[in-house]
Image: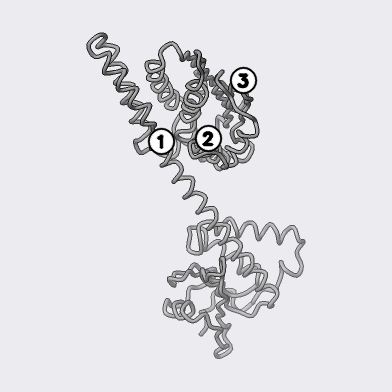
Amino acid sequence: MAVPADNEVGRERPWRLFARAEPAATLAAARRVARQLAEGLTGPRARSAARALRRLLGVPAVGLADLSGAAEWGGRLPAAGEVTALIETVLRTENQAGKPPLVAYPLHVHDELAGVLLIAGTPQPAAVRETVGWVAEALERARLDASADKAAQAELRALRAEISPHFVYNALTVIASLVSSDPDRARELMLDFADYNRYSLARHGEFTTVAEEFHAIEAYLALQRAVLADRLRVQVRVAPEVLAVPVPYLVLQPLVENAVRHGIEPRSTAGLVQVRGEAEGNDCVISVEDDGVGMEPERAAAILAGQGDPGSVGLVNVDRRLRTVYGAWYGLVVETAAGAGTRVVVRVPRFQPGVLAR
């Protein structure tokens, strides 16, 4: 079985990059191929990866195929039946009538067959081993990234559903008590309750704006002030220039809820929650601070590491999503001490490619 020649089959390229190029160039090529395979063997950039591998190996064609038989090629595509037969048997083929052989090399991820690398031609064995290693590592990384993304989405769904029954009961009780004595106030709180639930539970895109997050924060704090009365004081200040900044959905509201539930509610006296948003150069900086019971810094570090109690899913989720979207430097900063309150700082770029509110 052979792959029909394209316009370069007659002048098969030498084993170039592996043998002659600087190690840095080879490493750069490997990284580029890994990025192109981030969405799998038949993703939108898999064909570019196949073409890059063909150039590196100096062969007429290179194919990447998954277990369904779907393939992306750098070179002319063989008949579908040929590809399917290779996937099913993962066999080495014989050179037929002097044409370049088509050879299938299995790609394993965690000891499981994930697909095959198809090579038309006769590259050096060391180059093939190196290439198979690159592709397998890229697939493993892609699978891990996909698993992490699914975990983050599952946490976000849990976050949306994490409305405290105790809070709901208390809010509705307060609203009911005001229906007769202060119907206008009861109506306002009922609208706040509806806004809070709509924003928390409705389906949203991945990103929203600082203005939308602050609107949800104000609705929540209005309800909590009605429930806690004089025990809760609130200050909310946001600079107009950051209102339109896009941020991940539900990235601020959980921090405010955490300040009230774990900072102020356990206090025996009144407490203050302050929320500020302002521009600092090219960044938008938002802080949520309470003068509540605080915690040991070691416990805060454990919570952000995912080792806290189940009720801390909000902080962990926000921290992970910030790092995923903006990079490791943009995770949460938590300043706290037992009995000294807690301050959580969110810093995001005001303008970030690919981050758009919908």
**Which percent across, then down, holds residue 290?**
55, 20
Q: Amino acid at mark 1?
A: Glu
Above or below: residue 323 compared with residue 83: above
Q: SS at mark 3?
A: loop
**Which percent across, then down, holds residue 71?**
47, 69
Identify the residue under disc 3: 340
Q: Amino acid at mark 3?
A: Ala
Toward the viewer: 39 or 55? 39
**Which percent across, then down, holds residue 127?**
68, 72
Q: Is residue 75 left or right of residue 23?
A: left
**Can you tell which mark lies on residue 80?**
none
The image quadrant where one finds the C terminus is top left
Mark 3, Cα crowd under 10 Å, few <14 / some 14-19 / many 20+, is some
- N-terminal of the pair, mark 2 or mark 1, is 1
* Label 3 to label 1: alpha-carbon separation: 27 Å
**Can you tell which mark lies on residue 162?**
1
Q: Residue at x 48, y 73 (%)?
A: 77
Toward the viewer: 219 or 213? 219
Q: SS at mark 1?
A: loop
- N-terminal of the pair, mark 2 or mark 3, is 2
Quarter of the image holding residue 206?
top left
Mark 2, Cα crowd under 10 Å, few <14 / some 14-19 / many 20+, is many
Q: Nearer the viewer, mark 2 or mark 3?
A: 3
* Label 2 to label 3: alpha-carbon separation: 19 Å
Q: How many marks?
A: 3
Q: Is residue 86 left or right of residue 53?
A: left
**Which percent across, then down, holds residue 353?**
54, 39
Identify the residue under disc 2: 315
Do the residues under discs 2 and 1 have CB atoms within 8 angstroms? no
